[in-house]
Image (cartoon, rainbow, N blue to C red):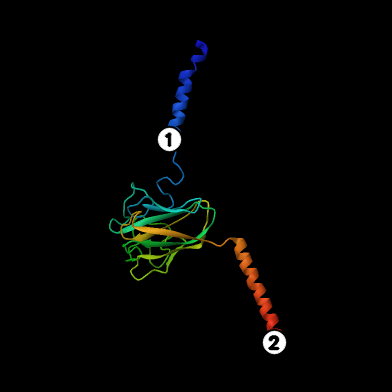
Amino acid sequence: MDRSEWRWAPSLIAVVLALTGWLSSAAPVGAVPFGECPPTGLDTSCRLEINISSSGVVSILTDTGVSATFDGADDTLIGVRNNSSSAITSLHLTATSAAIFGFDGDGICTGTPRPAGCPFGPTGYEGQGVSFANINGPTTAGDVIFAGGLPGNGGTAFFGLEDTVDAASFQAASTAAPEPATLLLVGTTLAGLGVVRRRLGKGNN
């Protein structure tokens, strides 16, 4: 390589360094802040995110840059992101000891700012399209239901939980929505059973 070819080396090095810096600063998928939560009380976004990966693995991530409680006392703002290819109908949450479903009336719709459209449900802790069911006696476990299913490939939702919880405070398990082909098969089977039953009924007359 002669001296005339070397004159481009500093410019090339500068371009490589700039590109490396840009790539390292680019936010990866699922990085904080968790944008599925609107500003709520002290929180500008979700404190925790329940993340369903592309392979269906459920994990709980934390944004330490957001207040641990959106009300400054004992409530946590939770986001959900479904990166799997299938819709999910619900999440089952189980806490080790915290009464995460022991809602006491000061949910996500009581702070300032609050999500537009509040309230979304009777407890005040529901987000849009979210409801709660099957809560146990100690209020340490229950289901988070997504109306119409939470779509795959990046579908999001949000809600609040009682108590100051972190990623180690509870476990989450998702329930996948039935595939359309499965629903069609079930419907066809039920219709066929109905026809057989009517024919058998006529034969007995």
Mark 2, residue position: 204
- From the viewer's perspective, is 111 left or right of 200? left
Percent coordinates x, y for residue 24 in the rendering: 43, 35
**Mark 2 or mark 1, whichever is nearer to me:** 2
Q: Secondary structure at mark 1?
A: helix
Give me the residue at 36% from left, 58% from top: 170
Image quadrant where residue 101 sits: bottom left
Percent coordinates x, y for residue 190 in the rendering: 63, 72
Is residue 108 at all visible to an observer of this figure?
no
Q: Answer few, some or many: residues within 10 Å of disc 2's Cα (few below 14, many 20 plus, some between 14 and 19).
A: few
Asked if residue 18 is positioned above or below residue 42 in the image, the reply reads above
Mark 1 or mark 2, which is nearer the start of the sequence? 1
Residue farthest toward the bottom in the current orientation of the protein: 205
Image quadrant where residue 198 sits: bottom right
Asked if residue 44 is positioned above or below residue 105 in the image, the reply reads above
Residue farthest toward the top in the current orientation of the protein: 3
Percent coordinates x, y for residue 14 in the rendering: 45, 23
Mark 1, residue position: 24
- From the viewer's perspective, is 101 left or right of 148? left
Give whichever of 187, 25 is nearer the camera.
187
Image quadrant where residue 191 sits: bottom right
Give me the residue at 52% from left, 11% from top: 2
- From the viewer's perspective, is 189 left or right of 109? right
Is residue 177 at all visible to an observer of this figure?
yes
User: How far is disc 2 from disc 1 in space, using C-alphas?
Assistant: 76 Å
Amino acid type, mark 1:
Ser
Amino acid type, mark 2:
Asn
Give me the residue at 69% from left, 82% from top: 200
Give me the residue at 61% from left, 68% from top: 186
Q: Secondary structure at mark 2?
A: loop
- Quadrant showing the C terminus: bottom right
Q: Answer few, some or many: residues within 10 Å of disc 1's Cα (few below 14, many 20 plus, some between 14 and 19).
A: few
